[in-house]
Image (cartoon, rainbow, N blue to C red):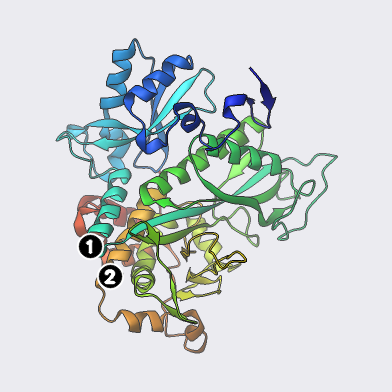
Amino acid sequence: MDEYVCETATVHSEDRLLPASRLERMIGKPAPDWTVEDLVNVVAGQGIRLVSLIHVGGDGRLKTLDFVPRDPDHLRDVLMAGERADGSSLFGSMGIPAGASDIVVRPRVHRAFLHPFSSVPTLGVLCGHLGRDGEPLPESPDTMLRRAAARVEAETGVALHGHAEVEFYLGRAPQQEDIYGIAERGYHAASPFVFGEAMRRRAMVILSEIGVPIKYAHSEVGYIKADEMSDLMWEQHEIELALQPLPDAAESNMLTAWVLRNLAHGSGMRLSFDPIIREGHAGNGLHYHMSLVRGGEHLPMVDGEDGLTTEAKWLVGGLATLGGALMAFGNRKVSSFVRLAQGKEAPNAITWGRSNRKALIRVPIMVTGPSGRAVSPPTVELRLPDGSADPHVLLAGIAQAFCVGHALEGLDALVDRTRAERSKDDPEAALPVPRSLPEVAAHVQRTRALLEAGGVFPTHSIDRLIDALRSGSLEG
């Protein structure tokens, strides 16, 4: 069989064509159409020895439950039913007690992929969670997001899609052959002025192979030379993902972090999503772009020269209303507030704008071709979250905010009052963003009924969240 070599792997000739997902090429149909039998055939045909059920715990990190299929029927059972697990260990921080801890980890067949890092051939399958009653587990961040996304469509007739700008730093000891960059001048820098370009590109290929769609990637502003404070040199990069329905967008965000961590570990480099690596230097944001979809069509955000469409006002007004509370999901470390305090294009007030990168909410320009056709759909960007964010609960909160904006009285007045251009002349027009975790707790307490609406965030989970915020720590 003909082969050719790419940067990440030897690729067989039948794999040369799109789509980018390797399993889609193997199975010969798009992921939403996959069946259990399709995956059974892949396991048999590719000599796969392990099946890994991959899911998100209450701490926002990926977890795995591994199987060696004994025979085809055992494999079918695992793929269809999943397996039980200890919910108190996975979601104790979300309020599941040890006395009622049995849950089920349930695979989603269309979210399978060939594991890129396992030492033996492995099929990875993303999963959700069921409770003892067989219903989606309320304390699972995956359940919260899916309920929030369904509520948006039911109440507004609009579906929310989203994608993240994943910023990260790579660090390693200087080498003699290095050509150094310049502090805070790393944006779009190319090799040899960045050492992480090859790893970033390798991550893009791997992500595409496992079904994560990517918009683009580049080096970012941050660059920190090794000095007496640290013997590592650090440079910043970004991978911007492509729009997907919210549950898929959160999973893609998690998989991106997972791939980057594995690659950095294997390359002997340090990787950090921390909001601040060092004070005075650019921090790691996790900006989220939201698109509004009705009838399969992405809706415009701008109405005329300077106004917003009705649906865009729902999103902007809702984000302005819940912006401080959403920091409980998007700004979860003490260093998050260091990033905000030092500015550098980080929001300092609950405002929105068309081009102001210091606004909490931004409506970016659209790129169009010579014919006027948009290259990508219009979006609204939430610029407040950082690398400490928990994507599932953050996106669930954004979805709740959209429902708030949809039902909000005085929406036009709120949108006008929080416009960034107005706040320059009237400092009282917009509220400042919270400056500490206890201040975020006050915002959550004040708006908790909006977060809990529709059964999205369980009351006991919000209780625990407020307690943790008031204590000044969401970790541990």
* Residue on which the image places disc 2: 406
The answer to whether residue 208 is visible is: yes
Tags 2 and 1 touching, CB below 8 Å: yes
The answer to whether residue 475 is visible is: no
Q: Position of residue 221 (x, y in %)?
A: 67, 58
Q: Secondary structure at mark 2?
A: helix
Q: The residue under label 1 is which amino acid type? A: Glu
* Residue on which the image places disc 1: 155
> In the displayed image of the protein, which residue is found farthest to the right?
176
Q: What's the CA distance linking mark 2 and mark 1?
A: 8 Å
Residue under the image location 43 percent in, 28 percent down: 124
Residue under the image location 14 percent in, 35 percent down: 133
Query: Which quadrant of the structure image shows residue 182?
Result: bottom right
Residue under the image location 22 percent in, 63 percent down: 449
- Residue 330 vs residue 10: left or right? left
- Residue 234 vs residue 352: left or right? right
Q: The residue under label 2 is which amino acid type? A: His
